[in-house]
Amino acid sequence: GDRQYCETQGWAGDRSYVREGGGIYHIDEGYTGWIIRHRRMLHIPDVPARRDVRPLVDSPDFPFQSYIGIPLQIRGRFVGTLELVSYRRDAWTDQEIEILQAISNQAAVAIENAHLYAETRRRASELASLAAVSAAVSESLDLEHVLQAIVSAVLDVVHCERSAIFVLDESQQVLRLAMTKGLSAEYTARSQVLTLEVGGRAHAVATGKPLIVSDVGEDENLLAYAPMSRREGFRAFADLPLKRADRVIGMLSAMFVEPHRFSATELELLTAFADQAAIAIENARLYSQTDEQLRRQVEALSALQRVSREVNATLDLDHILNLVLEEAAQLGQVTHGAVLLRDSPEEALRLEVCTGYDDEEKAGLLEMLNGSPPHPALTRVLNSQESLLVRDTLTEGIPGFGLRPRSFLLVPIFYREGLVGLILLESTTPNAFDRGMQEFVEGLSAQTATAIGNAWQYREQLERGELLRRRADQLAAVLEVSRALHSDRPLEEILEEVAYAIQESVGFDLVLVSVVEGDPPYRRRVAAAGIPVAAFEEMKKVRQPWSVIADLMAPEFRISQSYYIPAEHQAHWRGRVDVYEEETGTGIAREPGKWHPHDLLLVPLIGSEGDVQGLLSVDQPRDGKIPDWA
């Protein structure tokens, strides 16, 4: 992380040194601090003779004669150290040092796996808390009960000591304290009503933007907060405005007793709780309406609750999106509807689900999404990031999307502060939609965003789980290969075992291992997995100069210690080197993020002296994706 020290987590042998030193080693202290700074092995065969760097506890009571410390690193990230001391000078041979380095590599992988597992459990706990709050919002119209659940969850999940929710009184333009947790009676009494002013306690509502403060006492712009923070005993806080569509309706506050730097994850969680509080407050307001508006609002609320229950019950995104269109159609005069999504702001919108469109209309809708110039309504909403209500396409001069629309409503879907989709509703009659319908669909948009977030987070959890499984398989394969390397079998047999281990654990169907021999050096193919025997025997006859192959591995293609040459650059190697290719045809278009049959991934095998000993090339990844830094 960002901490500049190491903490002892495991120890064998005499524990007196750890007790004396305290088990904490800062960046400028002792041997461990040296390793933190330099990120490389520190080997001292004669401790008394080495004076430029000394141990943390430099005392005759600990007469160490030799020391070795190895940084634990994975993919270039420092995670700890492995350190040994001895009462003998020159305690370790070169071979023993190599073994210690191998152990340190495996320890780094184990630590990383443990971190991933802990992160997965933490995220699961956070999702459970969010689900519980979402369930309370969807199952109860008791605003006090729901807000109490939210402030309690804020303390449990973010681990702050104080929390409060304020609700905007639109008629008086003040904030009124609605719920607290952990706050004193005096503070509660003083904070019943907050005026809306920039720089005041309700700054987040006055500006419509979050106010994140790591330490009240260190910010000269927050002197007005200092007396209040001293009385209540908090040093850091986050105030988030509660928003519904483009309106601010309240504020969620989380406070820490000590200075605290809010992480991106904590702010994301607080934003999710703020969204739930906003939904609960808005639900309560909707329920308080009267007459015909009340009936329509109650129907909208019921629809939102039905959608919310489904959001909490399933991760089937298509099911949720179709339900959103179904609920919208039941409340309004909707004849056509669609949900458009994208995975990032850089990508184009795609048609995810639709209803009411025949084949001709659907084809026209797809053409509008991919056409140039883009549809004017899409451009307007994407640029403004706001809903667009067109009551009559003829009088307002804004065309719809179907063949005969007279009115339509286009509502953005936001997730993690980015526009990830649109809800499109159309009608063949004019004035089919009003502001009430717009607000209802914006509520559906918030539920849709939650469903999208759940689906994406579930996908991320699956990917993390798959990553853990793959790393476990890779570790097992490394151990098998390690045993093979220490045997006296022929090189060809060992490398063939390596090739099959890579095929099984790394996830590529084709693996080819070559060695570099001769003077001048050339490449000789030795072992393969996934290549037909007859084809490989022919390939083994081809021995190419290593200089030609080395020339392919240009810096522009480097990823970590490998070289990925995408098919778009195949002119860089085609006709220069012999490559095994299956019959795939020509003119194959690449799908975004997917492996192409003409992609190359090369991994030079570097010896202990830094010289190239061989080459590993792989093809046909099982997940079908291009390589990344993971």
Image: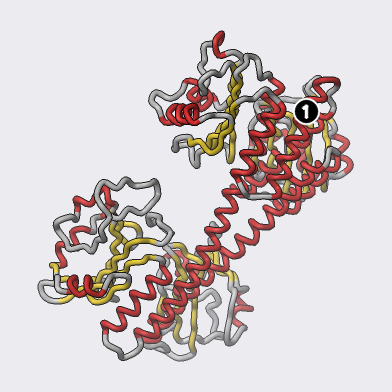
Badge 1 amino acid: Leu
Left or right side of 414 for 179:
right
The C terminus: image quadrant = bottom left
Tell me if residue 101 comes above or below residue 429 in the rendering. Answer: below
- Residue sitting nearer the eye, 132 or 589: 589
> Colour scheme of this structure image?
secondary structure
Return the x and y of residue 575 as percentages of the image width and height: 14, 56
With 462 as the anchor, is 373 left or right in this view?
left
Q: Which residue is mark 1?
A: 168
- Give coordinates of residue 50: x percent, y percent: 41, 79
**Which residue: 57% across, 37% down?**
417
Q: Outermost residue, top direction?
A: 395
Is residue 49 visible to us here?
no
The one nearer the camera, 416 or 529, is 529
Q: Quadrant of residue 53?
A: bottom left
Of residues 92 and 325, the one drawn nearer to the viewer in this rendering: 325
Give the residue drawn at x 75%, y 50%.
132
Residue 201 lies left or right of residue 93; in this view the side is right
